[in-house]
Every structure is written in C-alpha cells, then in structure tokens.
Amino acid sequence: MSVRNGREFLSIPGPTTVPDAVLQAMHRPAVDIYGGELIGITDSCLADIGRIMGTTGRTYIYIANGHGVWEAALTNVLSRGDRVLVLESGRFAAGWGGMAEVMGVEVETLPGDWRRAVDPAALQSRLQADRVGAIKAILVVQVDTASGVINDIPAIRKSIDAAGHGALLMVDTIASLATMPYAMDAWGVDVTVAASQKGLMTPPGLGFVGVGDKARKAYETAGLRTRYWDWGLRDGQAHYMKYCGTPPVHMLFGLRRALDLIFEEGLDNVLLRHRLLAGAVRDAVAVWSTGGVLAFNIPDPAQRADSVTTVIVGAGHEPRALLDYCRNKCGVTLGIGIGDLEGKAFRIAHMGHVNAPMILGTLGVVEMALNALAIPHGKGGMQAAIEGLARAVPA
Ligand SMILES: *Cc1c(COP(=O)(O)O)cnc(C)c1O
C-alpha cells in the first residue's frame, strides 16, 4: 500500500527543487559563446551574485560544485606551508580544511562540536595567542548543512578585530546564500564561496566566489595558484577566459532565470519566506520532541538555521524506517544524517524553491510516518506549524 504517485518532494538539503521556469530556460539550443546574448548574461550573473553576496568586489563563476570552489578560494590566496584555522561546527568547515591539507597547507582546528555554533570568544583567545600572525586564513561555514547550525559571521569578524589579527576571513555560504541574511562587505568577509544547487535553485554544477580587496592583495603572492582556478586569467575581457574555457551555456540560462526569480520576489522576501517556513518546521519538531524520541540537533533556538533542520532520533529508535516510509509510501525524500549523525538523525531541508504547501506537505508526511511507525511523539506538530504560519502570514 502506498500513496506515493503524484508530484514527489525532494526535501534534501541540496540539490534542491529546481523551479520549472529554470528547467525551461535551460531547454534550448546552444548559442554562440564569442558574441550575442550570452556575453550579457555572464556579466549580469556576475553582478547579481555580488548583489546577493552583498559585495562590490569581484565575483567569479566556476564550472564546479562546492568542493570545487573550496579549492578555488584556497589556491588563490594561500601558499604551501601557510596555516589556516578551521572553525568547527559540524561537517563542512572540516571538509574545506581537509582539502587545504592535501594542498600542503597546515590546518589547525578550533574545536567545536556538532550541536552548537562557533564560539567567537574561543576564536578571539586563539587569535590573541598567535602573536606572530602564523594563521593566514580562517575558514568557517555560515550554515553547516549537517548539523543545521547558523554561525554568527559578524560576531566572528568582531573577534578577529578585537584580537587585532590580520587573517583572511573566508566564509562558505553554499547552504545559506539566498536563504539567510548575508552581507559580505558590511561584515568584513574577505572571501565568500557559494554554489548553484541550494538556495540558488539551479542544478548542481556552478560555483561562485566573491573576493574582497584584502584577498585580492593576498592573491598577488599566493603560491598555490593553478591555471584553472586562477582569478587573474578570468579578469580580462575575453568571455571564453572568464570560464577558462567553454562557458556552461545552459547552466547560465538556468542561473539567469533563477536570479530573476529571486529579484522578482525580492531578496528580502525570499529571506523572510525562508524564516517563516523554517519556523513552521521548528514549531512541528518542537511538539514532536515532547514525545522523548525526537530532538533538535541544535538545542539553542537562536543557532538554528533557516535552511535546514536536523532532527536527532533517539531512545532506541533509528531514522531509517522513517526515511524509508516517507520516501516509499509518500514520495517525500528527506535528508539522512551525515558525518557524526549518520544513522542518528534525519534532516528536513527548507531552502530554495519551497512554499507553504511543500513544507506543510513534508511535515504532514513526517507526522504520518511517526504515526504509522508508532514512534512516540508529541501530538499536534502539524497543527502548531499551521497555527504559527497563519499568525505569521495574516490575511
Ligand atoms: C553542500 C555543501 C557543500 C558541498 O558542496 P558540493 O557541491 O556537494 O561540493 C559545502 N559546504 C556546505 C555548507 C554545503 O552545504
């Protein structure tokens, strides 16, 4: 018995649901890459990525996923033997650091854990102890997609300044750009990395880097530069070289449409929509959690991301049955727990092209699964989500 047939929901935190308008924009013949409309599309996408990042600095579009732009960012500002400080708050900053290590960069981790945001005070004391300025860059994610935490980037900047330290601040916004407020220049971020397949509602395959003046200065002496990632080669007028080769034509048509959707809705409203829908998810999870089995991975409500919610499954239950039920019986694919939370949690994504029926549908299916599997849970989670949204979105 299943009630699966119909439109299925991909509720994983990337790749996210691609709007039909974006898919349709990509469904077209290839075009000239040396002239014509694509040149303007590149320029406008570069400008609009900067607008969403909140920077007037240079931006780059790479044919790459998030891992690719991690590498792009590192190679352009670091040299072999440099030290970076990774601010742990889940899985992804450590992954970025791991990539640096393979490149011959010395990696130090500011220990954190999977259940809370980076502690700015701990960062400040570590930086104060680095009197010789050995740490060249600080790597941090804004939203960690595994733990579901949001890090306070302005507070991290304040700690660096309070310590009087000159390290570059490099921020991964792959899961947060266009889902939560971000202001690269105003927050004093030196390098921002992002990717197409989460808040930006475009298929996986494009990565973005925003570069501030200080990072641009570091670029001049960076020994790890390689031809494909190199910013300098991409800075000229030649359209072909902006991608170090053939542009990703169809991806650019898709990205252009996705950016149009964001600006047509208004970036502020996009962020508000994420906050409200995330609130609905949290309202439901809070009620379910009173049953003693489910719990928020991030106990502090102020540290929960508006992009994804990570829910721990405890008390002898495991998430597999719930994930299987939601997918096989109802056509809703939830995120699995990854890293330290593998086999211990599930994730509900609420980023990108999502609206109230999609979120309420997903929550309804989770609650249905909790019932069908007789997993103890507080009753009325759906009701709480509906009531919260109805208050937040008045007639
Ligand atoms: C998804 C994600 C990545 C990795 O991106 P890929 O495209 O899978 O390489 C990195 N950082 C964060 C915060 C992410 O959410």
Image (cartoon, rainbow, N blue to C red):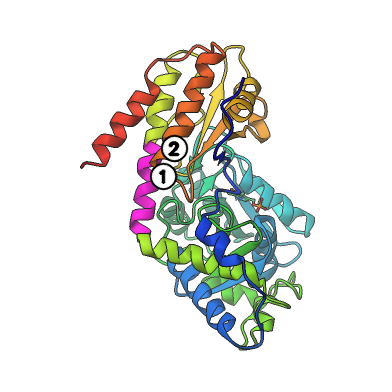
Q: Secondary structure at mark 1?
A: loop
Q: Quadrant of residue 252?
A: bottom right
Q: Label 2 neighbourhood size at 10 Å, few (<14), some (14-19), many (20+)?
A: many
- The number of callouts visible is 2
Q: Position of residue 134 (x, y in %)?
A: 64, 59
Q: Residue at x 60, y 61 (%)?
A: 133
Does residue 355 sit above or below 18 in this rendering?
A: above
- The stretch drawn in magenta includes residue 278: yes
Magenta-drawn segment: 267-279
Determine contact: label 1, label 2, CB under 8 Å.
yes
Does residue 229 sit above or below 271 in this rendering?
A: below
Q: Secondary structure at mark 2?
A: helix
Q: Residue at x 41, y 31 (%)?
A: 282
Tell me the CA gap for discs 1 and 2: 6 Å
Q: Position of residue 154 (x, y in %)?
A: 41, 54
| Amino acid at pointer 2 | Ile
- The stretch drawn in magenta includes residue 381: no
- Farthest residue in the left direction? 395
Report whether residue 128 is seen.
Answer: yes
Does residue 238 sit above or below 365 in this rendering?
A: below
Which secondary structure dominates the residues rendered in magenta? helix
The residue wearing badge 2 is 359
| Amino acid at pointer 1 | Asn
Q: Position of residue 27 (x, y in %)?
A: 61, 65
Q: Quadrant of the C terminus?
A: top left
Q: Quadrant of residue 284?
A: top left
Instruction: Give left or right: position of 316 versus 117.
Output: right
Q: Quadrant of residue 217?
A: bottom right
Give 155 or 336, whichever is nearer the viewer: 336
The residue wearing badge 1 is 355
Which numbered dot is residue 378?
none
